[in-house]
Image (cartoon, coloured by chain):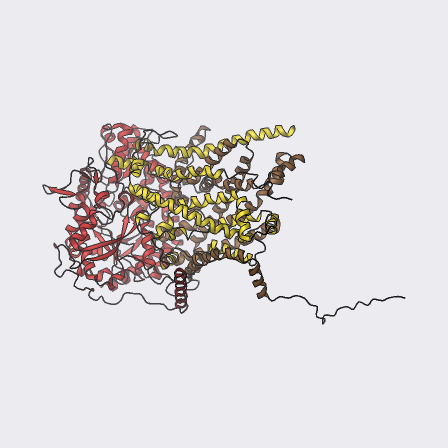
Chain colours: A yellow, B brown, C red
């Protein structure tokens, strides 16, 4: 009973702390969202807090009416889906192989991978490599170079290593091949980490603009992040146009940052709930018959 | 009758048949047994070789003079010329010091925060509240660095929220961004705020991997929640924690460039200026790729040494490591 | 299979390259050969000259970098492209680069040997890193084939400024945009209604400015009258814009106006370090005075532009640095915050200082680099003529800026006027089409430089008035002579100059704020000496002397 009282107090404090967390994280975000719908005078005067003031859709309209915006959005979706699929396949297999203690040369290959985290060639060699592969201006230049994040791979590897060995032994006794064990047993039990990695890769791909900037030189292939980044640079350097009046120009300049952010975050916010449902415990229950 | 069994001691001349297979056939044997496993290695290794190792050759320009537009491998050997250049540059060591200090402070505070959040969330029974906190907490991760820097400058201004609070308690407003002593706290705080929610996701995933039956068994044994946390939860996520810790230690030389660039100013250079921003300013006057590459190699070597050391220590004390 | 073979072939290429590297051959890339006549297979115009429209005898194409601003995103079907082809028989093949990172990609493309022939949007000075590799054409060898360029240089007496672009080998490598006159933009913007209300005359000198601010402070004790911006954006420099236009009036350089704080002393015929000069000290003393008297807001040195503007548009300050674009933006905000008609703001002439009514500035701007590969292009001569026509002829400049007469604009009483349905920068608010977005004219990639008449054709009346007043009342100071250094020397020089510049900026801020008393000035100069100021000056002066000797 004593412990329950202590625990009760802890639970209350816990909730308070987490409410504080919500306050410092959610409110700034809502402030930005509010700005994206507000008028420039109110923004410039610093009067916008959590609710839009001087409700104004000019910036949204200007962007959403621009055909280029939609083309680049479509590009981003393609790049993200393809890039994430490729990355997941490569990273998961790599992590699995390296997690097997019986693999000869395991240390060697792992070191080989870790080494690449610290040494890279720089912009020019990478550019020339892609050029020589004939991949400039193609989707491959976007999805392949970032296919394996060694960081992610190592995390996945540690998850695989934490799985009980009896699982695999049981499977191989049953006559399953390595491929089979991997696909039918290990993967289904790794849903939390797989979901997490899908999220990480997808978000990474979604937000990336640098590869596109380096290797693409046709603007109809640009992803939306590059488009928006360019927009932002143009607006802040005062080169805005695409609007039909001087008024619009300034309105856009005032909240382009906020609008850009909302447009970039929105899809992720919509996808995240799907990922969250994989964070369900108890998957391991009953999978190993002792 | 006594039977003496003579056991003849084998001398070392005696050939004891030991199966010593030459190394080559060991490899072949492993390959044949685990060919499926090795087949899965092929693509990743090819990927590493082509997209990571081949471009690494470009690093040679740290030892050769590179002129933009000329030979991509540089024009002529200059040996350690560029390394000597930064070793002898007092300004470099100042920003090196800043990089280390800022990075270590960031690590010190940013590393535990997501873990704590994940553990706290783990204690929440209401699924709705849990999901809500989780989603809210990772939102800052998505705010672009431009927006965040604007927020930081706004918050720390004389009319901003922090100074309003200070004045409420009767203090004098502090010009945070003009005082070198305040830069690091401001920067680290903003980093913690931005990363704590997103970082927690990984730990939450790790937490779901802990077998529920362990908790049940512990409850039966009479352990309270706190003891359960110490003996089950923490060991359960320890591999993930160790992996991330080692990786982050290795990354110590890579301090967030863009954010610092947007919030620093000459008044706080003493503490805010890091290697990447320093190189940026040098590059504005003359793009010296060779110099930047030499410094990059220096940072890489430090990172590598740190990772190896961290891994070695962690294996010694916790049996967990990267490899 | 083919892919694997291709990859193998590439690996072989790598090995070969590696072996060439191991051989350690160094190549002398200085362009010391005299230029031969540009290649031409009869494509160039035989009788091309000023006043003539360039037209190639055969359809040809040239690759060019294109600076893509998202607001008027690149479109393949712009009238601009087809009109160029119609008039000149040249089709441009653009490599589209987002403006947000244009300089970086340009550097990457040139460094990897993959640059297009024409590389526009290059500011004079940005071509220097690429000179010693020979990747960029020494255009000075070929300007004799560019009659419009030469004509404007002669007409507007620009040769001294062009000579400033010469590198150590005596040649210059960038074709700058040419202005007939200096185009001042940054200055102080004030609440003219507040000044009028309190009978304060618009100040014409810095002393008058200080007096005016004092009076404002007496009348409005709760307001710090001057809160400035541009300390944290752009190239980070305390009070970057303010010092840029104020420094020349004090006889020195500062803010954005300098990257390394060296300036040329005409009397001594050598370069001196502005950051340690007594003129610089005088300027800092002046602004420190403003801070001490509570006339200049301390936060000016660290706040974001947004914060400074907020104070101004909300009436919490009365003076701020501005340019022609910002003044319009602020007005729109103030119509809402203070109410239209209840206030008025305007740019005032830059106040005069101890050295009189002077401004610094160059008449050269944004220009073009040409890839050295052009030399081997069979249509080289046509390329030169095309660039000359499109960027330097009156006709080409007008096309780039205004478009096609009759379609996008017409001439009324000698003045250019947009067609009724077409808008450009708010000059025709009722238009449904935009000159840039829909037609590709008036963009930052092609439309720069030109006659004052052309430049002012798109300015507002207020801005034209400002320009005229500045031209009348201010004398333009001569620019620094060149001091080109060899690549090795440049490496060294940059390493010394960056910490020097940092020290100057830091102490500029500290002295102005008062966190460091001006009595410590000599200690500060000693610190500069310890950081290598004298060594740097020696390098600069030596380079200057060497160059002077060579060009004799």
Q: Nearer the viewer, residue B136 or B300?
A: B136
**Taking B26 as reference, is B149 left or right?**
left
Q: Residue A113: x percent and y percent?
A: 50, 55
Residue B169 versus residue B320 in the image, above or below: above
Report which quarter residue C234 is drawn in.
Answer: top left
Question: On the image, which quarter does residue C376 sit in?
Answer: bottom left
Q: Give the farthest residue toward the left.
A: C413
**Residue C228 left/right relative to B95:** left
- The residue under the point 64% across, 66% down is B20
Q: Is residue B112 at all visible to an observer of this figure?
A: no
Residue at 16% x, 52% y: name it. Answer: C86
- A235 lies left or right of C393: right
**Image location of residue B226, percent across then percent down:** 62, 35
Residue drawn 39% across and 30% down? A50
- Looking at this rendering, what residue extends furthest in the bottom direction? B13
Seen in the picture, residue B29 relative to C157 is either above or below; the reply is below
Residue B239: give x, y in percent of width and height. Answer: 57, 46
Closer to the camera, C30 or B171? Answer: C30
């Amino acid at each position: 009973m004593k412990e329950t009282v202590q625990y009760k107090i802890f639970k209350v404090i816990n909730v308070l702390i987490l409410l504080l967390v919500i306050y410092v994280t959610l409110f700034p975000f809502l402030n930005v969202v509010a700005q994206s719908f507000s008028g420039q005078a109110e923004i410039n005067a610093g009067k916008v807090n959590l609710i839009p003031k001087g409700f104004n859709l000019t910036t949204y309209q200007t962007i959403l009416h621009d055909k280029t915006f939609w083309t680049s959005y479509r590009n981003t979706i393609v790049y993200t889906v393809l890039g994430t699929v490729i990355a997941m396949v490569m990273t998961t297999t790599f992590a699995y192989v390296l997690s097997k203690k019986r693999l000869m040369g395991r240390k060697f290959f792992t070191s080989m991978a870790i080494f690449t985290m610290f040494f890279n060639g720089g912009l020019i060699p990478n550019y020339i490599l892609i050029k020589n592969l004939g991949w400039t201006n193609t989707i491959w230049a976007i999805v392949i170079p970032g296919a394996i994040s060694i960081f992610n791979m190592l995390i996945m590897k540690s998850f695989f290593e934490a799985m009980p060995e009896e699982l695999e032994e049981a499977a191989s006794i049953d006559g399953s091949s390595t491929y089979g064990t991997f696909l039918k047993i290990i993967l289904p039990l790794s849903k939390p980490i797989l979901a997490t990695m899908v999220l990480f890769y997808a978000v990474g791909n979604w937000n990336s603009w640098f590869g596109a900037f380096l290797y693409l030189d046709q603007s109809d292939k640009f992803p939306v992040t590059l488009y928006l980044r360019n927009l932002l640079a143009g607006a802040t350097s005062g080169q805005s146009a695409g609007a039909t009046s001087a008024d619009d120009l300034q309105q856009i300049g005032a909240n382009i940052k906020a609008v850009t952010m909302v447009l970039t975050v929105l899809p992720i916010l919509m996808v995240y709930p799907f990922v969250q449902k994989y964070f369900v415990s108890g998957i391991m229950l009953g999978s190993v018959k002792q | 009758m006594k039977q003496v069994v003579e056991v003849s001691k084998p001398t070392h001349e005696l050939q004891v048949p030991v199966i010593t297979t030459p190394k080559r056939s060991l490899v072949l044997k492993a390959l044949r047994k685990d060919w499926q496993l090795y087949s899965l290695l092929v693509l990743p290794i090819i990927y590493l070789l082509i997209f990571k190792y081949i471009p690494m050759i470009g690093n040679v320009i740290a030892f050769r003079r590179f002129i933009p537009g000329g030979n991509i491998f540089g024009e002529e050997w200059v040996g350690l010329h560029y390394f000597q250049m930064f070793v002898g540059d007092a300004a470099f060591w100042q920003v090196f010091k800043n990089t280390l200090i800022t990075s270590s402070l960031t690590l010190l505070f940013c590393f535990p925060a997501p873990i704590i959040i994940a553990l706290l969330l783990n204690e929440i029974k209401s699924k709705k509240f849990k999901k809500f906190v989780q989603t809210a907490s990772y939102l800052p991760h998505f705010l672009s660095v431009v927006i965040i820097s604007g927020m930081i400058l706004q918050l720390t201004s004389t009319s901003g929220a922090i100074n309003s609070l200070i004045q409420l308690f009767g203090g004098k407003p502090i010009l945070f961004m003009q005082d070198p002593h305040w830069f690091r706290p401001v920067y680290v705080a903003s980093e913690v705020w931005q990363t704590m929610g997103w970082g927690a996701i990984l730990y939450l995933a790790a937490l779901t991997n802990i077998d529920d039956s362990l908790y049940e068994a512990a409850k039966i044994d009479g352990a309270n929640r706190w003891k359960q946390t110490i003996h089950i939860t923490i060991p359960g996520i320890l591999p993930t924690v160790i992996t991330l810790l080692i990786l982050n230690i290795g990354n110590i030389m890579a301090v967030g460039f863009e954010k610092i660039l947007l919030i620093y100013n000459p008044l706080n250079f003493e503490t805010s200026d890091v290697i990447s921003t320093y190189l940026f300013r040098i590059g504005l006057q003359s793009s010296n790729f060779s110099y930047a590459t030499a410094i990059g190699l220096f940072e890489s070597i430090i990172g590598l040494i740190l990772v190896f050391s961290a891994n070695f220590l962690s294996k010694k004390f916790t049996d967990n490591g990267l490899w | 299979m083919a892919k694997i073979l291709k990859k193998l072939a590439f690996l072989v290429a790598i090995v070969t390259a590696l072996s060439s590297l191991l051989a350690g051959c160094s190549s002398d890339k200085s362009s010391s050969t005299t230029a031969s006549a540009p290649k031409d297979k009869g494509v160039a115009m035989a009788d091309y000259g000023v006043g003539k429209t360039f037209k190639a005898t055969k359809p040809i194409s040239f690759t060019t970098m294109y600076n893509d601003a998202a607001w008027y995103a690149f479109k393949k079907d712009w009238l601009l492209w087809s009109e160029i082809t119609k008039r000149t028989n040249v089709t441009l093949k653009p490599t589209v680069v987002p403006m947000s990172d244009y300089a970086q990609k340009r550097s990457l493309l040139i460094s990897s040997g993959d640059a297009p022939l024409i590389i526009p949007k290059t500011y004079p000075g940005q071509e220097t890193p690429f000179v010693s590799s020979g990747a960029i054409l020494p255009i000075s060898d070929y300007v004799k084939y560019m009659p419009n360029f030469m004509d404007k240089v002669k007409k507007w007496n620009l040769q001294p400024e062009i000579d400033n672009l010469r590198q150590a080998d005596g040649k210059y490598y960038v074709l700058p945009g040419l202005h007939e006159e200096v185009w001042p933009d940054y200055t102080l913007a004030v609440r003219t209604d507040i000044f009028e209300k309190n009978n304060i005359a618009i100040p014409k000198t810095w002393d008058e400015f200080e007096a005016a601010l004092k009076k404002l402070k007496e009348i409005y004790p709760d307001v710090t009258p001057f809160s400035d911006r541009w300390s944290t954006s752009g190239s980070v420099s305390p009070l970057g814009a303010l010092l840029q236009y104020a420094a020349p009036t004090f006889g020195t350089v500062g803010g954005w106006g300098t990257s390394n704080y060296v300036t040329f002393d005409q009397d001594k015929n050598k370069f001196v370090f502005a950051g340690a000069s007594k003129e610089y000290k005088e300027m800092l003393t002046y602004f420190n005075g403003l801070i001490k008297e509570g006339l200049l807001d301390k936060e000016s040195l660290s706040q974001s532009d947004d914060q400074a503007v907020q104070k101004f548009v909300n009436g919490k300050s009365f003076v701020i640095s501005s340019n022609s674009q910002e003044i319009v933006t602020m007005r729109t905000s103030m119509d809402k915050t203070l109410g239209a008609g209840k206030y008025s703001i305007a740019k005032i002439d830059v106040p005069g200082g101890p050295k009189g009514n002077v401004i610094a500035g160059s008449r050269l701007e944004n220009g073009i680099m040409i890839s050295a590969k052009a030399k081997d292009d069979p249509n080289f001569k046509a390329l030169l003529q095309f660039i000359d026509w499109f960027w330097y002829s009156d006709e080409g400049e007008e096309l780039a800026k205004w478009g096609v007469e009759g379609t996008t604009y017409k001439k009324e009483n000698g003045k250019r006027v947009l067609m009724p349905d077409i808008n450009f920068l708010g000059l025709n608010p009722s238009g449904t089409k935009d000159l840039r977005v829909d037609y590709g004219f008036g963009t930052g990639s092609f439309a720069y430089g030109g006659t004052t008449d052309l430049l002012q054709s798109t300015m507002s009346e207020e801005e034209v008035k400002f320009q005229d007043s500045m031209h009348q009342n201010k004398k333009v100071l001569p620019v620094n002579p060149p001091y080109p250094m060899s690549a090795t020397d440049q490496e060294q020089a940059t390493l010394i100059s960056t910490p020097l510049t940092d020290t100057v900026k830091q102490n500029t801020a500290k002295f102005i704020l008062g966190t460091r008393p001006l009595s410590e000035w000599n200690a500060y100069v000693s610190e500069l000496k310890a950081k290598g100021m004298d060594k740097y000056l020696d390098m600069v002066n030596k380079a200057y002397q060497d160059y002077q000797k060579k060009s004799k």
